[in-house]
Image (tube, rainbow, N blue to C red):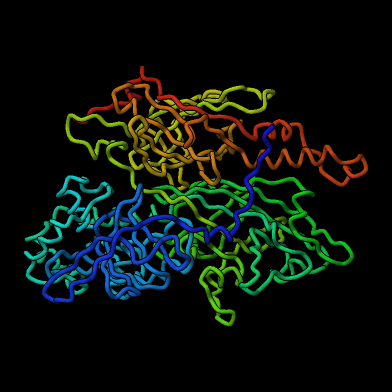
Amino acid sequence: MNKKILLPFAFSTLAVLMHGCGGESAKINEDPTKGVTVTKNGSCDVTADDCLQFALDYPVAGLNFDCSGDKFNHFATKLDSNVVTGACKLGDEVSFYIQGEGARKISLGTVKLDNISKLKISVPPRIRLIDMATGLTGKSPVSFSSSDETVNVAMALVKILQSIGAERGDNVIGDLQPIELTIEKKDQLVKLSKDIGVSEFTSGEYIEVLKPWLDVTQISNEQAFIMLQQLLNLTNSGILQADLPVTKAGGESSSTTTNSVRPDGFFGCNKDLIDCIKTSSNLRHSMANFLLLSDRQGYTLGYGQQWRGPATIASDLVLAPYVLVTKVKPVKIQVNAQNAWLEPVNREIQSNQPLRFSLNANANEDLFLKQGKFMNGYAVAGTEALYKQLIKAKENEVVDKKHLGLWGQNIDGEAYNGTIDILKVNPSSYLAKDIFRTAANVKSGQSYIFPLYATLNFKFSDATVTPKDVKVGIMIDEHGDIRTDIKKDATNIDMSGNCAKTQSINPDGTITDEYGEIQYRIGTTGATLFSTYDKSITVRMILSNPKFATVNGAMFGLNLTDGTGAKINIHNLLQGQASGITLTNFSNNTVTWNNTFAAYQLVYNDLYDSLSTEDKNKYIEPSAEEREFAKRYSGTVSITVADQNIPACKSIQTKS
């Protein structure tokens, strides 16, 4: 049996080097009446330790940028697979602009790389339009509102890029697609009467000044704001992982120096934080881990496991808290879809709307992530030492304690508090219109595919599990997010659907369909893949709700380790074959799903069964139900299109 459990992440892996851009450099032209020549998309070799490759949230290739550490060359972004990248040395300031061979220039802001990432990481951090707008105005947004000056400038940048794409036919208004600023288009900036900078953006004058070169009036403020929100959601999307305190020692505080950092993971106790590993009466430890995903519309969902129990004390010394996993059963902690816990611009956890983990029907025992900030865009640190490492702070620098990850919970009237480290990986990218075809991005008379209704078919690795197969209906919507499509009177075996349209979005994150049935968010798409016979969308899903019965807790496509990615190939569907979809991993093999809660329950069951009779008296015996549940730790999953005999389920639609 495969009893593999996802292991904790290691922060040391954040220094893994990337391979990326190259090209030849070009000297700048010092004549102030002339523009720039660009043949390179970075000032440094992206494999070098001091070189930071970055990606843009809006995929625009050919965007000019200068690195403060290189006084002689100019650069431009380029499209690299599903992202648009550039590179400068760590600590540089990056100035973005649009300019051709003439002197006319549109300034798009200067971004300090230290505000994006102070560490070289394996996945290029994203520079957002909101970051460029902040560089222009010199002010971070007070709130994410169209009335905010900086947000309004970012909306102006959206209008320019969307209009350039629409002019070239790269995108329709409201659809995010990669665009290119060609040399020919940039050279036409000579038509402008003046340069454009922050004053023209804030006053709105840029609209008239740009008219000889580009008409941006086709995009409304509302459309620009929606696109800006979509860009923020994409950057904040991804897989969120928190792990057990596997490196936290007992009997002493964790190291406070950045030279020997040990992440504390997701850990706490029923005492003050500083007393969690000090010997005291009635000391109870709590630890947990989780895997969550955040989708394209800003919703976060998923689940984790928690262990609570008396601290283990030997020779008057508190042992490492991880020993708790060998003492007590895991308890599931579930995140029902939530979209207000993270402030989208500064990426701080909202203390007035914390992320809520539900344990059972008693809401008074829910666990809350109360504070924390994603530093460098991808990590929350629970301790000062780890925080300082993430921002490359000196030992004597003062830490903003509001940025540290903290959680709280009340159990049986007793308060638990603790720290948490969180890593975010695998953000989503744009969905290429040639593959992700919707009614919004095709012309009248053309066919489109999404929303796509389908059925997942789950099988179990353990041959003794019944039922053998479980069907779950899903819909991949026009945004690229995935929800259930479960018909009325569905059974635990057959939860396929009838392709119901969305009627309303509920405050609890669920969806009510046109027949009044409640549907659940279960995942999202990552990106599109293109080759001769493989036109795919990558997918990631977590089914976490009692509604899913025997597949409650199943997850796949998270792409955290080799072989755990998943993609739906719709090549044949795009060729007109109504049933032409397949679900495979990135090596085109069958997709395996895992259930981490069931796997941990299986670990406990095996531990209990291996104990002597005397030792078993110190443990709670697994129930018959828990033993059956633990058998559902893994399996395979496939996909078919929904019932094509139902008109609403037609997998190929034609735009009228």
Q: Quadrant of residue 200?
A: bottom left
Residue 406 visible in image: yes
Residue 555: horizontal and vertical position, in percent? 55, 39
At horizontal 32% and vertical 34% (from top left) the residue drawn is: 450
At horizontal 66% and vertical 55% (from top left) the residue drawn is: 244
Residue 222: horizontal and vertical position, in percent? 24, 55
At horizontal 59% and vertical 38% (from top left) the residue drawn is: 553
Residue sitting at the far right: 614
Q: How many marks?
A: 0
The residue lying toward the viewer, choosing from 44 and 12, is 44
At horizontal 25% and vertical 36% (from top left) the residue drawn is: 439
Considering only vertical position in the picture, is 586 above or below 338? above
Considering only vertical position in the picture, is 246 above or below 302? below
Residue 406: horizontal and vertical position, in percent? 59, 64
Residue sitting at the far bottom: 396
The residue lying toward the viewer, choosing from 417 and 427, is 427
The residue lying toward the viewer, choosing from 621 and 424, is 424
In the image: residue 115, left or right of residue 73: right
Residue 364 visible in image: no
Q: Quadrant of the C terminus?
A: top left
In the image: residue 78, left or right of residue 611: left
In the image: residue 73, left or right of residue 203: right
Residue 296: horizontal and vertical position, in percent? 39, 48
Q: Quadrant of the N terminus?
A: top right
